[in-house]
Amino acid sequence: MVIGGGVVGASVLYHLTKAGWKDVLLIERAELTSGSTWHAAGGMHTVNGDPNVAKLQQYTIKLYEEIERISGQSCGVHITGGIMLAGTRERLDWLKMAKARGRYLGMDLELISVDEAARLFPLMDKKHFAGALYDPIEGHVDPYGVTHAYAKSAQIGGADIVRQTRVTDLQARPDGTWDVITTAGTVHAEHVVNAAGLWAREVGRMVGLELPVLAMEHQYLITGDMPELAGKQEQMHCIDFEGEIYLRQERGGMLMGTYERAGVPWSETHTPWDFGQDLLPNDLERIAPSLEIGFEHFPSLGAAGIKKVVNGPFTFAPDGNPLIGPVKGLTHYWVACGVMAGFSQGGGVGLALAQWMADGDPGADVWAMDVARYGDWATLKYTHAKVRENYSRRFSIRFPNEELTAARPLRTTPIYEQLKAENAVFGEYCALEHPLWFAPTAAEAHDRVSFRRSNSHAHVGAECAAVRESVGLLEISNYGKFEIRGPGCAEWLARLMANRVPPVGRIVLTPMLNERGKLIGDFTLCRAAAEHFFLIGTYAAEVYYLRWFERHRPPAGVSVRPCAMEYVGLSVAGPQSRALLQTLVREDLSSTAFPFLSFRRMDVGMVPAYVGRMSFTGELGYEMWVTSDYQRALYDSLVAAGREFGLRSFGGRALNAMRIEKSFGTWAREYRPIYGPFEAGLGRFVDWRKDEFIGRSAALEERASGGILKLMTFVIDAADADALGDEPILHDGRAVGWVTSGAYGHRVQRSLALGYVPAALASAEDGFEIEIIGERHRASPQAVAPYDPSGQLMRQ
Ligand SMILES: Cc1cc2nc3c(=O)[nH]c(=O)nc-3n(C[C@H](O)[C@H](O)[C@H](O)COP(=O)(O)OP(=O)(O)OC[C@H]3O[C@@H](n4cnc5c(N)ncnc54)[C@H](O)[C@@H]3O)c2cc1C
């Protein structure tokens, strides 16, 4: 049962029939398109910051031909092509990067001069621009036509659609199915999909779910007929980033929309049920600054006059990406909402969700859209602040070292003020503040945003030097942690994890695989006692992991408890870390008594802690986990004891650089559900001696075939800008792969990148290049990690 007949619900319905489900029903409160869909501008494009979302956008645009053919309903597709105009050097750099990213996705993007842009889009005044990016696959569709084409195609495939019927409540039956209460009676459904768009929050609340979505008012205007357009071919789409406007032709005039800075939310807490095909009152004053720039940059628009203004609401998640997938804690309850670009993304969202429902797997990497990326911290007010920020920055450049400011600080650890006093520059992750780097003075403690090496570069270098030469102190609270206890927990973990379960007092690093043998997690598994484990992984994936644990339910008596903020942490790393810590603990920390990958409950000073001997820096190091009430005392003890060893705080940027020097991957970068463990270089962490674990047979096949891709480390001949992630990797001039992470390795004094290439190229020694901000640089593949390849430093 799909709730909601907007473009998204209709697409989900169609894709369910395509997946072979015939007994499917869509219920619509009013008529199809009665939410955001009917008044959308219908624009579509393939470019997206996340390459996996971009792929689904490509799929959506290709799909229109298919649903037109099946349904006989026109989608009103106009592929006009589009240009994105840059007014500044930074924006040009951004466009160069977007073009490069498009390269390995097979997109035909082209950087063009201002003259060429003006030839393609004569309405622009050249003097405001510095260059442009041309995309041949852009255009617009008819929102009504698209929604009805999906709906009719679904009906031809066996689906039913009921209009003028509102779902008023959802009641779970003990067997996990649903009684769907509607204004026309109750329907019994095995699965329900919340595709309620503007009412997604309300349909979420029917099951006690508070979805992080908020609707924003959005305005566009249509000009009077323009003589400049008469008798000409249809104008192409245009985005003017600096003006924060988009344009396309609408009959004899132009449609101009804007994402204004002072965006206004609509119906902040409840969406009224009687809101139908209504428009909101215009507020041209609010968008006046954008209009002013628009009329300056495109002078003939100003002369054409305004014929019509449309102001309508549509919903956003805090990061602007859709929310899709099954919801943790609920059986057979799926969401497909927060889709802010229904005509670019609706098809991809429908496909992924339908495959997920039918096959138990979305069939694509949808991490960027997964509803599980948000935890309880995404409260209503947090969502409001982030959505407003995201809306106002829709056309702004997000620099790689730029930390956004809305809803901060929200979550802090007990040592936040101490770190601030050390001039920490903080980043935000799952709404939690964590130090990125430390400035020498308070006045210097901010990032100057740039695509190139920035003002933090030298300071991050000094932090890495301290870790290499003496000892560094790092806050490590921002990890996901689970405490697993009870009889049978070792057996359960053995089935879930690909590596072996460690004996008491030891740690193993372990991938977690799905049935297809793909990576769905990478963990540090620490065994405190026979029936007591700590599982440490990525915090942003906490809900994602819990959803998986729920699906592979632990046996009776075994408890899995998320404890991310209950246990916070500090780590010391570097050759002096042992000597430092030894001054605070009674246990013998020598390598014989407490070797690499040991784990033990110890008192550190007065603080009861779990201490693990490991460090993501690749140096000798220790991680200490304590309940949050002790973190401040632990920090004070370490800082006091560290004085004689030259202890220096370091942050996330230094850690990132150091783990790349060690070729260590990380979740959502190197490790994602599209890679297998051998492709990702984690084959040595798969324990074949176990007869059974989830994904074993698929992983076995991958081992035999060697996989399709291979994660490689490269040293890049780069001058002042390093790879960041998503740059294309070229071989003999052809895009063959993509960068997953990049940084300057201060210990090896080289620019580095990790990335995937086809396995067949894994042994090629030269011919590789990586494109950074429009320039290709020689990239030398490394057979071993650039820093301490034998790993002797961390084992010493
Ligand atoms: C002014 C404006 C311009 C836009 N321009 C573009 C653009 O150019 N390109 C683009 O891609 N996107 C654009 N959008 C965004 C686009 O409209 C949305 O991405 C898309 O419409 C979202 O579709 P949806 O199906 O998720 O939600 P909706 O369209 O809101 O559909 C939800 C449906 O669910 C029904 N429903 C809700 N609750 C219940 C219930 N309890 N029982 C039964 N039925 C229920 C509603 O009646 C509604 O029909 C624009 C939006 C606006 C407002």
Image: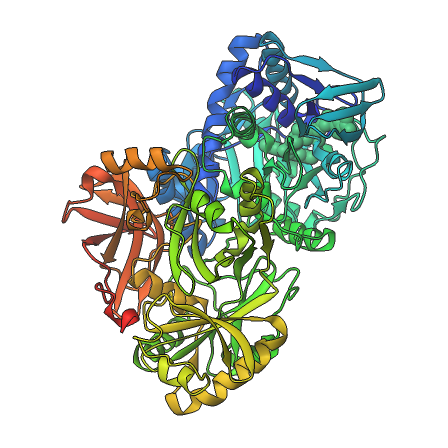
Q: Nearer the viewer, residue 297 or 403?
A: 403
Q: Position of residue 534 (x, y in %)?
A: 50, 59
Residue 245 visible in image: no
Q: Nearer the viewer, residue 319 or 209?
A: 209
Relative placement, left or right, of 685 versus 494 is left
In this view, 524 is above or below 438: above
In this view, 40 is above or below 75: below
Q: Position of residue 622 (x, y in %)?
A: 41, 73
The quarter of the image holding the N terminus is top right
Residue 433, image quadrant? bottom right
Q: Position of residue 357 (x, y in %)?
A: 56, 27
Please tell me how many numbered marks the rendered image carries. Answer: 0
Residue 756 visible in image: yes
Residue occupying the far bottom of the picture: 644
Residue name at image x 18 percent, y 54 percent: 783
Residue 571, image quadrant? bottom left
In this view, 419 is above or below 79: below
Residue occupying the far left of the picture: 765
Judged from the image, the quadrant occupied by ligand 1 is top right
Relative placement, left or right, of 245 versus 1 is left
Q: How is the image coloured?
A: rainbow
The quarter of the image holding the C terminus is bottom left
Relative placement, left or right, of 294 versus 677 is right
Residue name at image x 68 percent, y 46 percent: 212
Residue name at image x 22 percent, y 53 percent: 779
Q: Nearer the viewer, residue 569 or 283?
A: 569
Q: Position of residue 356 (x, y in %)?
A: 53, 29
Residue 13, image quadrant? top right
Residue name at image x 51 percent, y 50 percent: 489
